[in-house]
Amino acid sequence: MSNYKNLIFYFFGKCFFIIILTFFYSQFDLSIEYSVLFLIFFGVSSIIFMMFKKVSLLKELVVLFFKFYFPIFIILFSIAYVYGPSFYVFRGNHWDWFAQISMGTTFNQFNWGSYTELINNEILTVGEVSPEAIGKPYSKSFYFFSIDGPNNRIAPSLFFSSIFIVKNISPFLLAYTIKVLFFTSIFPAYYILINSFDNKLGRINNYIIALAFALGTWSFYIFEIDALAQLLTFSISIIFYTLLLELYKQQTDSKVTVYQLSFLASAVFLSYPEQAMIIFFSTSIFIILYLRLLFKKLYFYLAILFFIILILPKLISYLELVSTMSSATNDWWGYFGSFVLGRNNLILDPNAINSINEIINNSNSNIFYKIKEIFIMHIDQGYSLILLTILPSLLGFYYLADASFNLLNFLFLIVLNMFLIKIIFTNTKSIIFTENKNLKFIRFFLLFQLCACIAFLLKNQLYIAIKIFFYLAPFISIFTLLIFKKKNRINYILIVLTLLFPIYKFSEYNFGIGKHDSFPSILKVDLKKNIDWKFNTSNIKKCKFIEIDINKQIPNMYISIILSHKNIDYFNNSKFTNQEYKLEQNKEIDCKIFLKNKKFKVSRLISTKN
């Protein structure tokens, strides 16, 4: 691809942004404003340089933006514009989303030194924990994310804090903008990977395939669960695999590519250490098997040293985080993984969840017994086609698979499964009996993915198995949507079906949820159904001191973050904040924000002063 090198610049720029923000904020104790000013200066200088020295490059980068980023950007913002705040305030996992926005708000207001002082002061004065609340009651209702998690993944929050410099726009709309920008980079990343895998498919075909990958379930899954760290690194990991493939095929200068891989890997680690460890482990095995000559190269060890220097600020704390996550035995699998059983299953029934959790958490039975019991439970409840939903769902077509029985659905699932089995058989045969380096590359990572998922399943860690499955989703995508032959062909039927997913998912409003099925687009339906998330800040322009009188935790944090973002003074009269802190407030309240009839209301209070 003639513009391959130019298109890839964006991803190195993103990595540069991640590394600079992490070092400037957490190591050099610079405020976000200074970090952003540096990055703006660097960006403007680069543009000026290109205008005078490489005008053609600047023009080409603009063309690439409109070709790859702009279409996805328009799609996602059109949906947000039509459906409003109830769509973009949060998508699926409100806890993770609010955690990142909370830390972004805090980072925007404190440099690292002041932030650590804030943590110490808040811990010393923390109030009594309410049984109805998640987290401890600090001076602000959203602080428990920031205070309890300074060693967690901070890269997405640093991006948020950078754009939170803009004060006249809702922080949730600003955060959604960053999220969309993360998502739009998936499209060009896949385009580069497909072109590297087979540059004989043609530009139009590559574009269509990459678009299908970008708008398919694997990409939107990350978008919908509000996994900001994974969304930030997903496209970078695709570029990492692309360069590794190029290195394997020896189509690029080895020394340069190795340093580029080191740079990309450092950004992935600083953003999402759990995924980074999977990438490092799989890549290490791949190098031992196929690229052993690198061990004889000095630049290989220098690249490793370069990587260690870049990740040093977060090395210990993130390794501890990875260790904690790898041993997790939580039951989040239902929310994150129920789509594997088709679009409609018992996970959508609150009465059945406890029974399924009992099966999963039974330490006296093995994984195969648990799977059998879950199947029997579904069949007993009328989901008799449950076995026919698994294969389509694992390959990204859960929305076509309904376990409920009727003759037409049964015949459709039979045909769909036979079609998919034929593809699996054809492609498996091709990658087993091959000397083609492209197919050997795909074979290795698919096999690694399969073994890693099975290993964690056998350890009863379903959630970790699901996460690993998605870390290596690009290889499943290629395996599914291409037909491996001497001359690879595109599976146009599956391409069309893949492109139908966004239409299926977002064609209905449904309180901002979209299509409500087993896909993790909403963790708690009532938060969308029972609350209208529109809040017009113009209603509080004349307020001098505001009371928040909201006794629901997420709505309370929502208003608190908005007011904090705008540096508006307020008093949070709820069990979600420190009671002692509240008693110290001496200002007279002249406005109150509360929830009534699903809407946020503002009332003006009459002054009691003489």
Image (cartoon, rainbow, N blue to C red):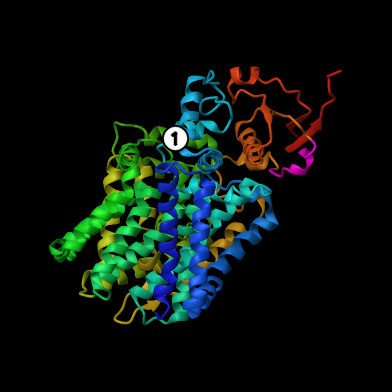
Quadrant assignment for the N terminus: bottom left
- At label 1, the amino acid type is Gly
Instruction: Report whether 350 appears left or right of 566.
Output: left
Give the quarter of the image for residue 238.
Answer: bottom left
Q: Is residue 541 magenta?
A: yes
Residue 513 in view: no
Q: Position of residue 28 (x, y in %)?
A: 41, 44
Residue 86 in view: yes
> Is 164 in front, or is 602?
164
The residue that appears at 31% across and 43% down in the rendered structure is 315
The residue that appears at 31% across and 78% down in the rendered structure is 485
The residue that appears at 40% across and 57% down in the rendered structure is 394
Give the quarter of the image for residue 541.
Answer: top right
Q: Which residue is mark 1?
A: 149
Q: Is residue 16 magenta?
A: no
Q: Position of residue 152 (x, y in %)?
A: 41, 39
Q: Using a 10 Å C-alpha cutoff, classify the residue at mark 1 as few (fewer than 14 neighbours), some (14 to 19) or many (20 or more).
A: some
> Is 295 in front, or is 17?
17
The residue that appears at 45% across and 78% down in the rendered structure is 205
Q: Position of residue 476 (x, y in %)?
A: 37, 62
* Magenta segment main secondary structure: loop
> Is 254 in front, or is 273?
254
412 in relation to 564, above or below: below
Q: How many marks?
A: 1
The part of the chain drawn in magenta is 533-542
Which residue ends up furthest to the left in the rendered image? 296
141 in relation to 286, above or below: above
Q: Position of residue 156 (x, y in %)?
A: 48, 48
